[in-house]
Amino acid sequence: MKVPFIDLKRAHDPIRGEILEAFARTLDHGEFCLGTEVSNFETGFAAVQGLSCVVGVGSGTEALHLIACALELGPEDEVIVPAFTFIASAWLPEYVGAKLVFADIDPETYTIDPKSIESNATEKTKAIVATHLFGLPADMDSIQRIADQLGAKVVEDAAQAHMAKYKGRPVGEIGDAGAFSFYPTKNLGGLGEGGCVSSKNSALLEKVAILRAHGSKERYLNHFVGYNNRMEGLQAAALNVKLPYLEAKIERRREIADKYAQGIILQNAVLPHEPNWGRSVFHMYTLQHPDRDRLKTYLAEKGIGTDIVYPYPLHLQPCFADRGYGVGSFPESEKLAKHCLSLPIVPELTDAEVDYVIESINAFS
């Protein structure tokens, strides 16, 4: 049996006709940058996510960039970012010339450790990026308490956390602003790039909406130095088709995660931990094992696709080699990078495929 880590064709085949109809509708009305499809998606996603409002942009990375601009972060400011996350989280301070400061992760949740935030904060700390990694919310109350003491803003990197909840609250408006991604492999993914910014601060969202369109609110009248970061109509059209299916697909991911949690009995394996304050949407199901590389090879021989997400902590990336960090700076992030392995958890998996993954893992020796 072959079990793919991800299969986008398999994911889209059941809704192919709906997507083609949505594309035809977009071709008919001709609104390819912003427009009706984007407005409808902004309204629909905000409702499904439980947010007051969102602004559609070109990608999750661009969402982080525009948040940094809207918060007016700059060279005199420091921004704390987890050392284990997708690198886009670190671009937030980099794109605006602020100082990037790393913090370690909590070994149980894989999200940023509030104690490490406190250890690395200074009077120059003006923002904290809380990445809801693999679909699990970070410990937002602890992070917000530290931010309030520092007078800093909290940015939620919710790129992997559509419909995730922290103590019953939807992610995206718990902090000062949130960034979502609709990259094709995300739990809600388009057919290309896409993202949005969320916030309970309407003035911040208005500024993001202006910044995404060359700094213009009225046509040819530019209020700020802006960017070309608008969401495309065709991407929004595809997302509008997929949005009604999101809740059921996330529930399927949680079912698969529960099967893994109940069924995997591999010695020395550390399975994902879901604290009682967080509802994960399992964008990834990432376990740890000291013999990770051999386990990955073994599963590939069994026809099971896996991925190492992520093989390098950010502080050891070559692009940050001049920042004063080295091996041992953030031991939990380094340990996770050495031991992590993500299993297939896409909602299209059959029970038979999930059972085969479990049986294969348990037979590893």
Image (cartoon, rainbow, N blue to C red):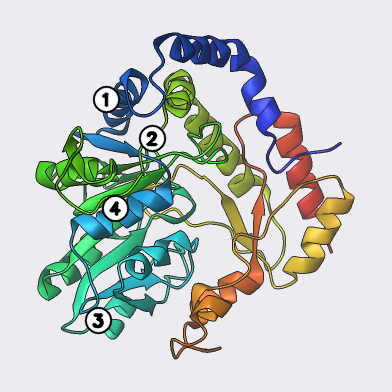
Q: Residue 66: which disc?
A: 4
Q: Secondary structure at mark 3?
A: loop
Q: Quadrant of residue 139?
A: bottom left
Q: Looking at the image, is mark 3 or mark 4 earlier in the sequence?
A: 4
Total number of numbered labels?
4
Q: Looking at the image, is mark 4 or mark 2 earlier in the sequence?
A: 4
Dot 3, crowdedness within 10 Å: few (<14), some or many (≥20)?
many
Q: Residue 121: which disc?
A: 3
Residue 7 left/right relative to 41: right
* Towards the viewer: 345 or 228: 228
Q: Amino acid at mark 1?
A: Thr
Q: Residue 43: which disc?
A: 1
Q: Amino acid at mark 2?
A: Met
Residue appearing at x 81%, y 66% in the figure = 294
The residues bearing labels 2 and 1 have C-alpha atoms spaced at a distance of 14 Å
The reply to whether the C-beta atoms of the residues labelled 2 and 1 are less than 8 Å apart is no
Residue appearing at x 45%, y 56% in the figure = 133
Dot 4, crowdedness within 10 Å: few (<14), some or many (≥20)?
many
Circle nearer the viewer, 2 or 1: 2
